[in-house]
Image: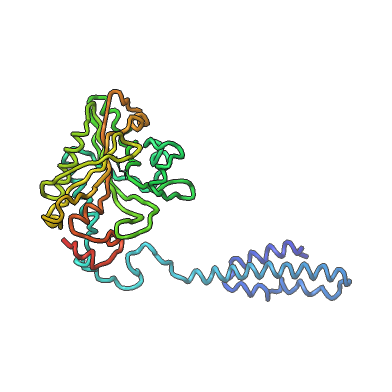
């Protein structure tokens, strides 16, 4: 006579390979369990009855699982990576005339191209960063209120989607240290997406683009920086421009400046009424000695300048776009204006 244990093992094995697993409950081996029940004493019968019920429950669970397995085997696998429904016929390709490059992509490329031609190396900025690159290495003292000015988002793990491309400064400086010490210079721009926890309106977005420049040499000067920026803006807008600066505070530059251009007629300014209409384009200044030190560069021997500003603002001015929100809206009517 088989023990209940052995029988349980055998029946489960049969279920696992059966094509009609529920039939196992009709098998002689299973039914045999009930046959001797009537001749048992009442309390033995109760114990045995419970054993059989427990076994039945186990078998039914196994049968359900096996039935599910058999059913699933008939479902065709779905390739979610396929570019169209692979079980249907191949669709026509969408005409490329319906797609356009996003104006920010096109313009960012123009910006980067101008700086590259001026001798700057271009590096895309990171989209997730840490407290050290966002603040520490940029001379923001611990708990300093200037940190609040950047409305940073934070992930649950404490990482920061960068609020400016300045998070790349320390990396650029470290990467260029050897060239600098060998008698060369550091000249790089970093560009990419930045994020701020801001209320969105016609001139504010939570997600936007910046481009940042870093230049370090033995004798870099503000005059060189202003010359570089003027050359950039005149090249980008294709005309000569008036520029001016005013003092501004950023912990990572000293002195710090705001750089403005006078709105030119060709960019939508009325030649008479717009005279003296200054447009702030970016923040800039001489790199703070502490920022150089954070990258292990000796501020006694080397000095540099840095600037950073938004791309959207540049583009809005160039094309007379009145609302920043168009860029992230995905509106075709807007995007189609930029079909090349
Ligand atoms: N990172 C600053 C901002 O986004 C701009 C800046 C860059 C200022 C580099 C000075 C030097 O507000």
Vertical arrangement, residue 210 with respect to residue 22, above or below: above
**Where does ligand 1 appear, by image quarter?**
top left
- Which quadrant of the figure contains the C terminus? bottom left
Q: Quadrant of the N terminus?
A: bottom right
**Residue 316 location, quadrant:** bottom left
Point 29% across, 51% down: residue: 209
Viewer-closest of 138 and 75: 138
Q: Residue 69 in the image: state x and y as whole percent.
A: 54, 68
Q: Position of residue 123 (x, y in %)?
A: 27, 42
Drawn side of residue 81 relative to residue 110, left or right:
right
Q: Which residue lies at the image location 32% right of the left edge and 27% below the top edge?
A: 297
Tell me where residue 82 appears, x and y as whole percent: 35, 64
Residue 124 vertical placement versus 47 (above, below): above
Image mark count: 0
Q: Residue furthest right?
A: 41
Observer-nearest of 136 and 97: 136
- Location of residue 34 by image quarter: bottom right
> What's the image's color scheme?
rainbow
Q: x%, y% of residue 146?
A: 40, 42
Q: Between residues 140 and 156, which one lies in front from this camera angle?
A: 140
């Amino acid at each position: 006579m088989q023990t209940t244990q052995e029988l349980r093992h055998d029946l489960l094995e049969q279920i696992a390979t059966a094509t009609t697993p529920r039939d196992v409950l009709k098998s002689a081996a299973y039914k045999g369990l009930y046959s001797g029940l009537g001749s048992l004493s009442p309390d033995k019968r109760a114990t045995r009855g419970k054993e059989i019920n427990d076994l039945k429950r186990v078998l039914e669970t196994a049968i359900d699982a096996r039935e599910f397995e058999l059913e699933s085997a008939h479902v065709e696998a779905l390739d979610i990576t396929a570019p169209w429904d692979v079980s249907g016929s191949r669709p026509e390709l969408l005409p490329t005339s319906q797609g356009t490059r996003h104006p920010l992509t096109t313009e960012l490329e123009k910006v980067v191209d101008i700086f590259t031609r001026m001798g700057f190396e271009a590096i895309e900025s990171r989209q997730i960063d840490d407290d050290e690159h966002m603040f520490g290495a940029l001379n923001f003292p611990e708990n300093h209120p200037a940190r609040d000015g950047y409305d940073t988002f934070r992930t649950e793990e404490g990482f920061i989607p960068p609020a400016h491309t300045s998070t790349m400064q320390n990396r650029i400086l470290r990467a260029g240290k050897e060239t600098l010490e060998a008698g060369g210079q550091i000249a790089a721009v970093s560009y990419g997406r930045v994020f701020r926890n801001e209320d969105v309106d016609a001139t504010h977005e939570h997600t936007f683009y910046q481009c940042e420049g870093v230049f370090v040499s033995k004798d870099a000067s503000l005059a060189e920086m202003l010359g570089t920026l003027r050359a950039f803006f005149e090249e980008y807008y294709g005309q000569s421009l008036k520029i001016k600066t005013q003092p501004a505070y950023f912990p990572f530059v000293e002195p710090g400046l705001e750089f403005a251009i006078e709105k030119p007629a060709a960019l939508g300014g009325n030649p008479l009424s717009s005279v003296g209409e200054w447009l702030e384009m970016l923040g800039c200044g001489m790199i703070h000695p502490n920022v150089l030190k954070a990258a292990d560069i000796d501020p006694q021997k080397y000095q540099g300048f840095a600037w950073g500003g938004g791309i959207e603002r540049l583009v809005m001015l160039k094309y007379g776009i009145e609302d920043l929100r168009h860029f992230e809206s995905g509106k075709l009517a807007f995007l189609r204006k930029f079909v090349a």
